[in-house]
Amino acid sequence: MGLTKLFADVTLSENDHIKSQFAFASFYSGYGFFGGLAALSTDTMYAIKTANSSPLRVTGDAVAFPKMIDIVTGWNYLPCPYQTTKPIASGMPDFNFANTDQVKSQFQFAEYYASYGWYGTLSTIEPGKGYKAKTANSGPATFSA
């Protein structure tokens, strides 16, 4: 979905911006969005900064599963492709997580331990929220239904 259409019902101010893991766009009054990020996908989470607190409702077709994404070594922006809340054990994508890999929401976190699984204050993956994950490995990951 394009940024102009997505933010059509939101009051934007000069220098409000949105960023993905690798691109961003800033809003300029009288012009619109400018930057390398032109459209959104279900492959990543997005960080949005606005001066006004307006609700943002995104609608569309549900994500088809299995949902494949690529994970890089280091920090990744992970989406929640699900329509309902999932426990972290089944909500994280199938991937070769290593000991002490981390996942963070805005306020909680968990670390991965091979003999245990995910441990920490983050216990669920929720629709409408994004997550940052720090991984030692890279490669394809799959969200399952």
Image (tube, rainbow, N blue to C red):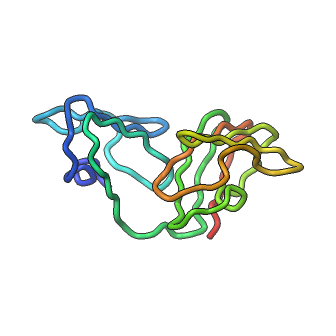
Q: Residue 69: where, in percent of width, then height?
A: 58, 53
Q: Quadrant of residue 103?
A: top right
Which residue shows up at 54% across the image and 56% down it? 80
The answer to whether residue 34 is visible is no
Which residue shows up at 49% across the image and 51% down it? 129
Q: Quadrant of residue 84?
A: bottom right
Looking at the rendered image, the quarter that the C terminus falls into is bottom right
Q: Is residue 119 above or below residue 94?
A: above
Q: Is residue 55 left or right of residue 128?
A: left
Which residue shows up at 68% across the image and 55% down it? 88
The answer to whether residue 91 is visible is yes
Q: Is residue 71 above or below residue 63?
A: above
Q: Is residue 71 above or below residue 86?
A: above
Q: Residue 19: where, in percent of width, then height?
A: 40, 37
Which residue shows up at 23% across the image and 38% down it? 33
Please count the marks in the image.
0
Looking at the rendered image, the quarter that the N terminus falls into is bottom left
Q: Among all residues in the image, which is located at the extreme right? A: 115
Q: Residue 107: where, in percent of width, then height?
A: 56, 39
Q: Is residue 36 above or below residue 64?
A: above
Q: Among all residues in the image, which is located at the extreme left? A: 30
Q: Residue 23: where, in percent of width, then height?
A: 41, 35
